[in-house]
Image (cartoon, rainbow, N blue to C red):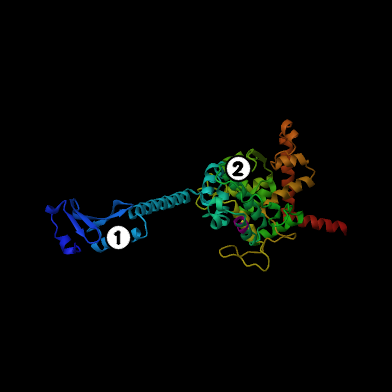
Amino acid sequence: MAKLTIKELDSLTEADKGKTLYEDGNIRGEVRVNKSGITVAFSYRYRFNNKTREIRLGVYPHISIREVRDNRKKAADLLSEGKDPALEKKLAKELNRQEQLKQQSKLDADENRVTVNKLFEQWERLDLINRKDKGSEIRRMFEKDVLPHIGKIAVEDVKKSHIINVIDTILSRGVNRMSKLVLSLMRQMFRFAQDRDIIENDPTSSIRKAKIGGKDTVRDRYLSEAEITELRTKLPDAKLLQTTECALWIMLSTCCRIGEICKAEWQHLDLNSKTWKIPAENSKNGKSHTIYLSAFAINQFEKLQVLKKSNKWIYPNTDNTDHVCEKSITKQIGDRQLSDERKPMSGRSKYCRTLKLADGKWTPHDLRRTGSTIMGNLGVRPDVIERCLNHIEQNRMKRTYQHQTLEPEKKEAWNLLGIKLELLTDITAKNKIAADEAATVK
């Protein structure tokens, strides 16, 4: 038997169908005719354990005759090592199949692993959607401080070190309270994952919030009477929007929250009956609240009516599609109280130190605290002040059995506050009182 040549193989015709070709080394080929044309299926016959066996070497012309011979040599080498080539080929095929199954299983497992990004989406869809703002503020915080750091990590791979890294990044900006809030929210999310068997252990569980950013401090800042007068004199130089000035005086004279004035609608305001009704969905505690407006507060709302830009929102956003962002007023006030060494941010107000007051930095929420403090100084009962603030009664027994509304008392409290603010903000009147006092002393 001689070696087969390419010329010999290529000269085969359909008439050669079924013909067997032979080559040295026990290589044999069966001529076949099918849809793909004329092919030769090569095999290698050998004896192992006193039995004749056969192993396929490949099909010409799908592989070359050289490859057929190489495959035969590999089989012969295995045979010389005392191994059955056919069995070895079968084992190799099975091992390859097992490896493929293993790789496919790994790919499927990786694909099914829940990343922090996916977990947040699920948490938002099933839990945060039930919150008042549908979770929009939490999404903003997570997109800024959490997801960029750990969003692509599988939830089960998140370690305590990952959480600490997120918190440390926030702390490096000097916003300690925000770091505690973000930790609390991450803990809620990972406990949500635990409840659904997505993870076994919560990576935040061993992190104590008290150890993050130092001890919590309760803010108790309020404006003194002198500072209220100081604010009145400084506002013209601050170049705030007139609507923002009105918002400040409304918060001070009604003790409302900043979110409540930002979300206020004209339909909730009745200047004839001198009331402003805050619906449950706009209040922090989810309870509706009626404010009896003093003449001082009504004056601010009348100014807003003149500046009216929306038929729905008292404070609309720029394109009148929704209410103004709750952080808008806070940013305007903060931008005007920068320390002497800080420069104003690009695109923000250049009047960066015009609203600094004698006792230090203040925020719009401090006006709510200021209003309630003035009420107390004017002799208003604490329980009435609490009702004016729309606080929930902390004593469970009272909360259960006492449901008096104290409407007349609240109306009187807001009226007293308004009168006091008229005096404190009327510069002409204060100058006259000071002059009269000076003349009396003389």
**Quadrant in the picture for the N terminus:** bottom left
**Quadrant in the picture for the C terminus:** bottom right
Residue 106 in picture, x, y percent from top left? 46, 51
Q: Which residue is mark 2?
A: 282
> Which residue, as the protein is rendered here, is positioned at the far right?
442
Magenta segment main secondary structure:
helix
> Which residue, as the protein is rendered here, is positioned at the far left?
15
Q: Which residues are magenta?
A: 162-166
Dot 2: element: helix
408 in the magenta segment: no
Residue 415 in picture, x, y percent from top left? 72, 43
Front label number (1 vs 2): 1
- The amino acid sitting under disc 2 is Asn
Q: Residue at x 67, y 41 (%)?
A: 291
Q: Which residue is mark 1?
A: 71
Q: Looking at the image, can residue 241 be seen?
A: no
- Measure the alpha-carbon separation of dots 1 and 2: 80 Å
Query: Reading the chain from its start, which is encountered first: label 1 or label 2?
Result: 1
Residue 410 in picture, x, y percent from top left? 72, 39
Rendered position, 290 above or below 423: above
Residue 383 in picture, x, y percent from top left? 76, 39
